[in-house]
Amino acid sequence: MRGLRLLSDHRPAAGERWIYSAGFNVGPALTDTGRIDVELADLARLSAAGARVALLSHQGSAKDGSAVHLDHVAGYLGGRLGRPVRYLPENATARARDWAAELHDGEIALFGNTRLHPGDEAADPGLARALAGLGDRVAVGGFSKAHRRHASNTGLLDHLPGYAADSLVAEARALDPWATGPGRGHAVAVLGGVKPEKTLIGLTGLTRTHRLVIPGGVVLNTLLAAAGHPVGRSELGSAPERCARAARAVLDRTGGEGIHLPRVLVVAGPDGVTRRIRVEDGVPDDCAVVDFVIEPWALDLVRGAERVLIAGTPGLYAQGNRHAAAAVLAARAGREATTLLLGGDTVAELPWTGPRSTGGGSALQYLVEGTCAVFEALKDNRRRGAGHHAH
Ligand SMILES: Nc1ncnc2c1ncn2[C@@H]1O[C@H](COP(=O)(O)OP(=O)(O)O)[C@@H](O)[C@H]1O
Ligand SMILES: O=C(OP(=O)(O)O)[C@H](O)COP(=O)(O)O
């Protein structure tokens, strides 16, 4: 965390024009509000000092049409902050810049979902420049996207002086003991979900530091395919070839040692009906892996581990495929404090009261690499004195 400008070191003044880059990647159902709650203290402090805050967040993706407007987040924020938070549905237009210029001292307004622009994820410099027109300084929160180099986080840092929000620093610091804690002898990681980072960073990195990795979700499907098992219509995620190469490299390096490959899988047929099959029989062409059975020896290691990380639901939990997840959680009952859940869907879906991080991919990157793209961009921003010509 050295070399960053910290928001906590800055005493905000009335009338200062801030952009606050947040990670409110939560759908209208607001199933889990953790990603909003972590930003409340920073926002309240800026507002109480009279700063004017143009709040920006991503949600969903332009790639699959899952990005929606964020009225639901503004409503929730207003309730929690005890003051109205308007949702202004644009962010890169002259109109949005006018709205930002008209904010009152202490006002917080949430501007359009940045993921409604394909250019956010493409780190379009023109979009970053337009977004930067909403303020004079940027506070970077949103730890859950700290591994991304997108227009709405690192892109803004090309134009404005950047400050690490307390939320960003606090979430990273909370992970430190999990990165530097016991090594192969004592730690177990459960991987799942659908995003490529679970394989590219999680499987690649955690097999070096953890006694046992239990792959689930797309990580398991990718490993099974890499090991030569037919996987039928199983989900292989958005970067199947890169993940397959990473899985093959892990298998070559480890010979499979320290990795749990199940003998029994739960597959769903085209009608959605599930049944158990043996891995050696292969997943039928019209079926997909949705869950699996963890071997008793592996559950013993989960039970005895000093620390357990769970990054991604190991099965399609929300659709009722809960066998692997339930077995892991049952094995950790009474040891909540040493069991960490990472990521949006994982935290929202699994019934767990222990520690959690709002970041899935970002937390894995931080744990494995010791930093994230956003921290490096903030350091670079400070070195360059970036944006200090700003009004
Ligand atoms: N075998 C599987 N096949 C398809 N999808 C899966 C499978 N296992 C888990 N998933 C999906 O992965 C989602 C979580 O993925 P991801 O976004 O990577 O996790 P997180 O948000 O916790 O980082 C779950 O909501 C679940 O629907
Ligand atoms: O949900 C997120 O990450 P996660 O699924 O790894 O927890 C973040 O909001 C980042 O979103 P993205 O993976 O669409 O860039």
Image (cartoon, helix red, strand yellow):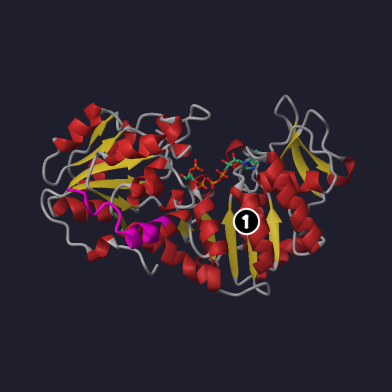
**Percent position of residue 344, x then y:** 49, 46
Q: Is residue 44 magenta?
A: no
Return the residue at label 1. Answer: 202
360 shown above or below 333: above
Left or right: where does residue 80 sit relative to residue 317?
Answer: left
Q: Residue at x 32, y 41 (%)?
A: 56
Q: Quadrant of ligand 1?
A: top right
Q: Amino acid at mark 1?
A: Gly
Q: Residue at x 35, y 57 (%)?
A: 381
**Percent position of residue 167, x then y:** 34, 57
Q: Nearer the viewer, residue 64 or 233?
A: 64
The 10 Å Cα crowd at callout 1, few under 14, some 14 to 19, many 20 or more, is: many
Q: What span is in magenta?
A: 377-391
Q: Is residue 360 visible?
A: no
Q: Residue at x 21, y 49 (%)?
A: 390
Dividing the picture into quadrants, the one containing residue 275 is: top right
Q: Nearer the viewer, residue 211 or 52?
A: 52
Q: Nearer the viewer, residue 331 or 51?
A: 51
Left or right: where does residue 339 sit relative to residue 226?
Answer: left
**Percent position of residue 127, x then y:** 37, 35
Q: Nearer the viewer, residue 48 or 92?
A: 92
Q: Residue at x 63, y 49 (%)?
A: 192
Q: Is residue 378 magenta?
A: yes
